Amino acid sequence: MHDHRRLGRELNLFDTDPLMGAGLPYWLPDGAIVRHTLEEYIREAEQRAGYRHVYSPVLGKRELYEISGHWDHYSEDMFPPMDLGSEQVLLRPSLCPHHALIFRSRSHSYRELPLRMAELGGMYRSELSGVLGGLTRVRAITLNDAHIFCTLEQAVEEARAALELIGRAYADLGIRAVRHRLSLPGEGGKYVADPDLWRRATALLRDVLDGSGIPYEAAEGEAAFYGPKIDVQIADPAGREATLSTVQIDFHQPERFDLHYIGADGAKHRPVMVHRSIIGSVERAVAHLVEAHGGAFPPWLAPVQLVVLPVGDEQAGHAHELVGRARELGLRAEVSGPEQGTLAARIRAARLVPYQAVIGGREAEADQVAPRLRDGRRLGGLPAAAFLRSVADRVAARGTELWEAA
Ligand SMILES: [Zn+2]
């Protein structure tokens, strides 16, 4: 069974240090590549879907969270305020309030809606030290977040499109949802009180789910404090479920921040806020990718995509030249030479690398490679240029297959 904490250390992806603190992992170069590649994928997918990216600070004044409702409904999960002279600032527990202020800072016409604002941004959660571990229970989180400011009529279509983005991302990442959940409020004072707004938001999300044909179950007590949400659930190898992606419809924060746009009638109207996350937190997404693939990432996400293995020292020069050509094509390639052991040992050491190119005397002479795939397949002698081009095309297309089926 794959545990992302053990694999993360073995594969040199991430680790923690008691001096940095529990729940505050750092990323090693190979882990940083996986993370960066994932973030780039998300930014591109969002840009294609009409989102525009912003940056906002990870600190905010206490008043900001009093207005958003976090201070009243969520403060148990927040770090205590820091005193700065006469004011108090907080490490933010979510990105929504900042995005609401950014929307409010400019006047907006109905023609600009839906306005899709996205950010991969930091947020913080005051987890108890006893439950911290790996990348799934952390105190510092990078959230793949977005807020769509739109009319009530547009909200259903925006939420539907967000679910579709999530589905496409899961296919590209080679992961799967175990369940879709419609998360509703439960008992207690954790939730903002406005039964009418809850009913309307819940009805909209049910429309989205029913229209998509995705089976789902409703669960009480799992909603955000300000509104219901669709949770896309994943499971770890032990079958423990967690929420990765979410889509929410929110009438509450537009009220609290007094957001408006100018309608076709020239009057002010209140927008709806659709909150959505494609891969949730980057930390949890990478943890899940490590576990789901056992460290054998899809080629486009792999820290090293191609290892070139010269049989003997005579082929070392040619191997380095081949790696140079692969890097020119944008591939992450390395040489594993005879100084690192026998050919069999080097092939074993590279078992998680999607593509391996063995170079013997004959291959070097003819500028060919004898490729081996991670799944054990051997492709026979191929011209080096054609092989590199084919790998680069597969990586660019972000497929999950190593090669066409034999
Ligand atoms: Zn939000």
Image (spheres, grey):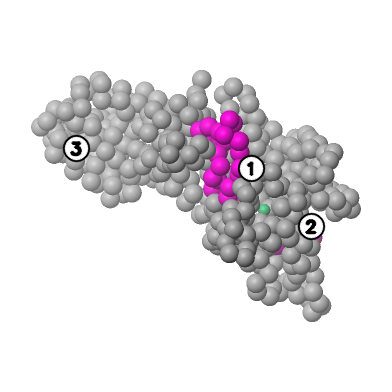
Query: How far apart are the two marked residues, 3 and 1, measured between alpha carbons?
Result: 42 Å
**Residue located beneath label 3 in the image:** 319
Give the numbered dot on residue 110: none
**Residue located beneath label 2 in the image:** 251
Q: Nearer the viewer, residue 22 or 391?
A: 22
Percent position of residue 335, x then y: 23, 36
Taking the magenta stretch, the answer to whether it contains residue 137 is yes
Q: Which mark is first along the chain, 1 or 3? A: 1
Q: Secondary structure at mark 1?
A: strand
Q: Is residue 201 above or below residue 403?
A: below
Q: Nearer the viewer, residue 20 or 250?
A: 20
Percent position of residue 124, x then y: 58, 47
Which label sits in the foreground, 3 or 1?
1
Amino acid type of the residue tagged 2 in the rendering: Phe
Percent position of residue 247, x then y: 69, 47
Amino acid type of the residue tagged 1 in the rendering: Ser
- Badge 3, how many Cα within 10 Å: few under 14, some, many 20+? many
Pick out the residue farthest to the bottom. Answer: 266
Q: Is residue 404 above or below residue 87?
A: above
Percent position of residue 281, x then y: 57, 44
| Left or right placement of residue 141 versus residue 161 in this view | left
Q: Secondary structure at mark 2?
A: loop
| Residue at screen point 55% across, 45% down | 141
**Residue located beneath label 1 in the image:** 245
Amino acid type of the residue tagged 3 in the rendering: Ala
Q: Is residue 393 above or below residue 236?
A: below
**Range of the magenta residues?**
123-152
| Residue at screen point 81% across, 42% down | 185
| Residue at screen point 68% across, 75% down | 107
